[in-house]
Amino acid sequence: MGMVHVLIFAHVLGARESTGIVLPMLIAGDVFAILFYGKHANWSYIYRMIPPALIGICIGAWAMTWLNGTVYKPLIGGIILILVVLQIMRIWKPQWFENVPQSNGFAWSMGTLAGTTTMMANAAGPVFGLYLLAIGLPKLEFVGTAAWFFLLINVTKIPFSWGLGLIRVDTLWMNVLLLPLVAFGLWAGRKLVERLSQKVFDSLVLSVTAVAAVRMVLG
């Protein structure tokens, strides 16, 4: 459900400002994900993706310094719409990505894109997921690898977000108030997944996300 909360906070608090408020909560979620699945991580792919992701973070931070609010909101909506399409392709047509060449160029392009989108919108989940699907990781390795990758990347983003004024003392107090709800969401999410098939759950989430993203693009 990673893209849903990005859009909700963007609507309520502003597309640019919300990225700093969401980041500490994402880190909290990453820590819990590691507790559940971290032991299954495949570190060779994490090491491979971290350098280009760091370059992408720098690109995203640079872009955030000069993009104004009028442009930023539809831009983030557009990025998320593209990621929704990629996620739909990943779910419904996984065979399309089975023959992607396992080249350094593919890894670096996906890593750079993941870093840029996570810095600008906290929305790199589908990009990294597409990469892991293409290389054919088993499910538990898939989840554990993604959990560690995003914890490392999200912690790296803290000084950038602080320097851009997106993380401040007042936003951290808001995080303190919201963290109990993050814990509740983790519990509720596990219960929900037990009751819904993965395909139905993903379809519902992607439908809501697509509608919200279109609204951001249209203003």
Image (tube, rainbow, N blue to C red):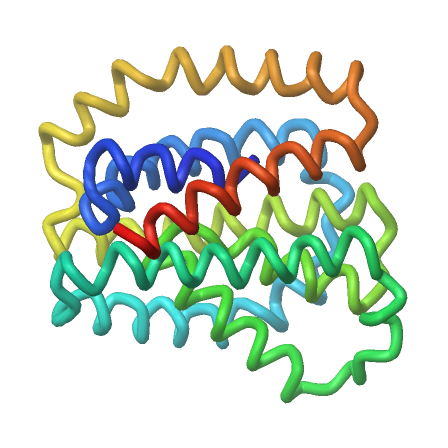
At which x and y percent is residue 181? 41, 13
At which x and y percent is residue 54? 41, 70
User: Which image quarter holds the N terminus?
Assistant: top right
Residue found at x 26% / y 14%: 177
Quadrant location of residue 180? Answer: top left
Residue found at x 40% / y 67%: 116
45 or 138: nearer the viewer = 138
Q: How many marks?
A: 0
- Residue farthest to the front? 218
Residue found at x 22% / y 73%: 62
Residue found at x 14% / y 67%: 65
Q: Does residue 17 sit above or below 54 in this rendering? A: above
56 or 70: nearer the viewer = 70
Quadrant location of residue 107? Answer: bottom right
Quadrant location of residue 135? Answer: bottom right
189 or 26: nearer the viewer = 189
At which x and y percent is residue 52? 49, 76
9 or 217: nearer the viewer = 217
Q: For this view, does 201 lie left or right of residue 212?
A: right
At which x and y percent is residue 98? 87, 71
